[in-house]
Image: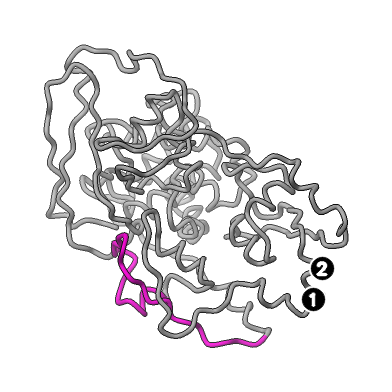
Amino acid sequence: MRLNASRRTRYLTVAAPAAVLGTLAGTLVAAPASAEAAPALHLVQLKDVASTAGVPMHSVPAQTSPGTYVVQPGDTVFAIAERFGLSTADVLTWNGLTWRSVIYPGQSLTLADTAVPAAPAAVEPATPAATTTHAVVSGDTIYTIAQKYGTTVDAVLAANALTRESIIYPGQTLAVSGTAAAAASPAAPVTAPAAPEAGQTHTVAAGDTLYGIAQKYGTTTQTLFAANGLSAASIIYPGQTIVVAASAPAPAAAPAPTAVAHPPLTATLDAEQAANAALIISIGRQLGISDRGIATALATSMVESWMRNLDWGDRDSLGLFQQRPSTGWGSAEQIRDADRSIRVFYGGPSDPNGSATRGLLDISGWESLGFGAAAQAVQISAFPERYGQWEAQAYEWLALHG
């Protein structure tokens, strides 16, 4: 969601002896960046005052992680991760959250890697013929693959020695258990996600996104937008009823349209955007980033901020990459420093934000990931498919402004 440019987030400075990060209280669940305007949210943020108080950051030893943690009033994901010596990105991943997710008092968070042990995978040795493989394509997730083959996320993870924080990439081959036998059985059709009936509804729960709801019911976000009078900038909230419109049953040829589900996008940059593109490219060259990495940064900035150094955004999101003070990306002033925010996105040994966040170079094997998957590994967006739509255009910008 993008907030109206005329509105500005207010900041309240508190004279405290330790760093106090902004608290985002509430139960709204937001869709990601969009060019459409939406009503502004009035948010109050407590500004980090550690530096002005002369108190060094991380001065309190991290507590031992309890495995799970119940959110208390005033908590943020960043503050919880810091308290127990964890990475904010890991806590988000372990709990299926994004940088824009809102946590709420009473919510239980997992503070440890919940990888499924390999041993349970051997429970069904009697049906070896039921194991098949799936070649990952762009846009795939473990969840959608499990849905396609009528199995579970845990089963796919166990069969491939993956964890819930693992990243899959196009061309990768995954073992999928229990599909061959199901295919031969008359009951096989019930294992596939049932198409929603006209008028079927879904009650929004905390953590839901329109993308996730669409995945669950085997439909598309555009269908949900049309059925509920929403847009990509709309906010949904727990307790809200969403109409899940059914697509007309299609014959076997239906998969063909998926090739153009997320068509490439193009744009001609104005002077402000061109200057920001040139800066992203220049810093990438200084850091020795490959053309692929620089193109990834250009596409990401276009999706998140239209390649403008915004002083507003969803909740407390700011700048070229819509980074958030409340999730550890730096202070508001630091994030609005375009040079610094670009370096933080790239990450690596020279990341001015240290290990508080995870940049592109901090993603193991990022260059072997799909173009959009590499951007998603940094941004953890609810709409990961958007980055890949700018791939071809990003390389053109690189050639034009580099």
Residue pointed to by mark 1 = 185
**Is there any visible trace of residue 286 in the rendered image?**
no
| Residue occupying the point 12% across, 21% down | 15
Frontmost residue, 230 versus 72 = 72
Query: Tag 2: residue type?
Result: Ala
- Give residue 85's position: percent from left, percent from top: 44, 23
Question: Residue type at mark 1?
Answer: Ser
Q: Is residue 301 visible?
A: yes
Residue 181, disc = 2
Question: Crowdedness of circle 2 by 10 Å Cα count: few (<14), some, many (20+)?
Answer: some
Is 333 left, or right, of 128 in this rendering? Answer: left
Q: Is 32 within the magenta?
A: no
- Residue appearing at x 38%, y 77% in the figure: 243
Number of numbered markers: 2
Where disc 1 sits, the SS reads loop
Viewport quadrant of the N terminus: bottom left
Circles 1, 2 touching at the beta carbon (< 8 Å): yes
